[in-house]
Amino acid sequence: MVAVQLPEAVRSRRLLLRRWTVDDVDLLAAAVANNIEHLRPWMPWVADEPMARSDRAAVMHDWDRSWRSGGDVVMAMVLDDGVVGGTGLHRGRDPRCLEIGYWVDRDHTGQGLATEAAETLTGVAFSMPDIETVEIHHDRANVASGAVPARLGYACAGERPDRVQAPGECGIDCTWRVTRARWAALRASQLAAARISGRGPRRRPMRPAGR
């Protein structure tokens, strides 16, 4: 069965999450260069930086081919027309599951942007008819990353030994998981609480967005 193509752009309350394309090669290079030491403890791919422009373009061509064939979507987090991080939806061995990844620019941490992006992409994932679970993985030492799924109501699905791939890692992979039914219940509870308080929902519903 051919996988359904994942959405290439979506808006949240503050963010535009949109697919990186090869036209963004210099924009991505600048965003990464500004965050090398900030990301080095947790992101294995930082070991390949600085990357030649042609090599980065080749990587982005691979992202494009994968997305067009129903694979991963790798996205920029955009706030007020500036890149403030990266995120995406990734397919694994289970065709009914998507994984969310994220990183936030060093000057924009502590603002809830990773949580907002992950919440939005969880909704995007469950808008796909074949998806039943969404997962977030992080190394146990990366406490900030683990706070995101916990805040959103994901359940801790266990820990397992993993290969250390970045300097800050301890080699224990933590898995957080939410099912379609659990996510629907969480959203219903949130909306009910908002109606009682008269404040409206905490976040806007996701909506598609063009480039």
Image: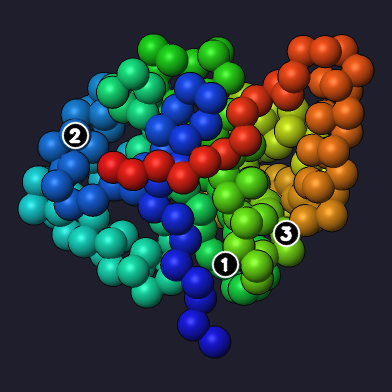
| Residue for point 57% across, 67% down | 92
Q: Mark 2 or 1, which is nearer the eye?
A: 2
| Residue for point 85% across, 38% down | 188
Report the residue marked by disc 3.
133
Badge count: 3
Q: Which of 103 and 48 is in front in this view?
A: 103
Would residue 93 appear left or right of 188 to someone viewing this image?
A: left
In this view, 125 is above or below 42: below
| Residue for point 62% across, 42% down | 138
Q: Do the residues labelled 2 and 1 touch (CB within 8 Å)?
A: no
Residue 27 bears which disc, if any? Answer: 2
Q: Are marks 3 and 2 in contact (CB under 8 Å)?
A: no
Q: What element carries label 2?
A: helix
Q: What element carries label 1?
A: loop
CA gap, disc 2 and disc 1? 28 Å
Model colouring: rainbow
Q: Residues within 10 Å of mark 3 (few under 14, many from 20)?
A: many
Q: Nearer the viewer, residue 10 or 60?
A: 10
Q: How crowded is mark 2: few (under 14 residues within 10 Å), some or many (20 or more)?
A: some
Residue 79 is situated, as x and y percent measured from the top left of the image, at 38, 22
In this view, 108 is above or below 28: above
Report the residue marked by disc 1.
92
Q: In this view of the protein, can residue 94 be seen by the observer?
A: yes
- Amino acid at circle 2: Leu
Residue 1 is situated, as x and y percent measured from the top left of the image, at 54, 87
